[in-house]
Amino acid sequence: MTMNVPPVDRLCGLITTDLVTLERWSSQLHSALLTPLQTLDDAATEAGFRFEVASGFRSFERQLGIWNAKARGERPVLNDQGEPLDISRLSERECVFAILRWSALPGTSRHHWGTDLDVYDSSRFSPGYRLQLTLDETQGQGPCADFHAWLSDYLCSPSNPGFFRPYDRERGGVAPEPWHLSYAPESDLLAAHMTADVVRPLLVRSELLLKNAVLDNLEEIVERFVRVPGPSGTR
Ligand SMILES: [Zn+2]
């Protein structure tokens, strides 16, 4: 496989080239995922689940909106336990790192690539249940616990067409997100090119809030929150 350097626009969610819309889930994903996703969907269905995609591609503008709403206090910024923080008590640097625990810096989200998606099983939901994408949902008596136990086995099996969990456990960066899947054959190509230098010019000219604190700490942010081990556990 030739490995062309992907354009910044592709890495940072500025273009929608090669995306296809999945009407069933109102989501967009890279066209390379259509067949492997169908394979995963079929396997989950066969195992008795109702496989769903909560979100796929997310644009830079959308991520910027999420980030700025948190920086302004319009959306809650949560601590490690998922409780709201009083961001007025935090330094700008502390605020940046608190947001990063649960939300990607615009330009660095793996959801910009169309190769990553959040998944769940709705077959165990009681009527009116609203998906939250929390760890509690995926463990113990949580409505998605059976699905995630099955998914853990499936991802290790020869049937897996190439999906892995980049945020499978605590690594001191992004909080664990077992529902976040990445299609390695596509995403590994992009991850290899994701550096602070790629995203810096885009952030400089953006309307990003807390911009100075972000730019002052950009290398550390990319190292801790963007670079994750690949499917084999190597970096
Ligand atoms: Zn995700």
Image (tube, rainbow, N blue to C red):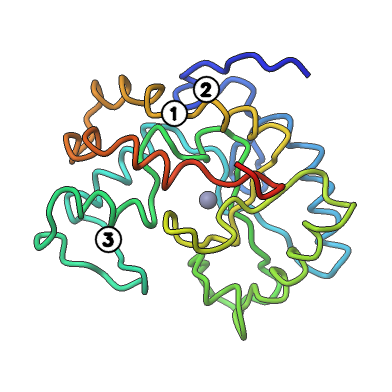
Say which element carries label 1: loop
For the residues bearing labels 2 and 1, Cβ distance under 8 angstroms: no
Q: Tell me which amino acid carries mark 2.
A: Arg
Residue bearing mark 3? 77
Q: Tell me which amino acid carries mark 1.
A: Thr
Residue bearing mark 1? 195
Residue 170 percent across, percent down from the top left = 50, 63
Residue bearing mark 2? 10
Q: Which residue is outermost to the front?
A: 234
At 50% from the left edge and 26% from the top edge, which residue is drawn? 11
Q: Alpha carbon of mark 2 to alpha carbon of mark 1: how far?
A: 13 Å
Residue 219 percent across, percent down from the top left = 34, 35
Residue 32 percent across, percent down from the top left = 74, 30
Of pointers 3 and 2, the one earlier in the residue sequence? 2
Which image quarter: residue 56?
top right
At 47% from the left edge and 19% from the top edge, which residue is drawn? 9
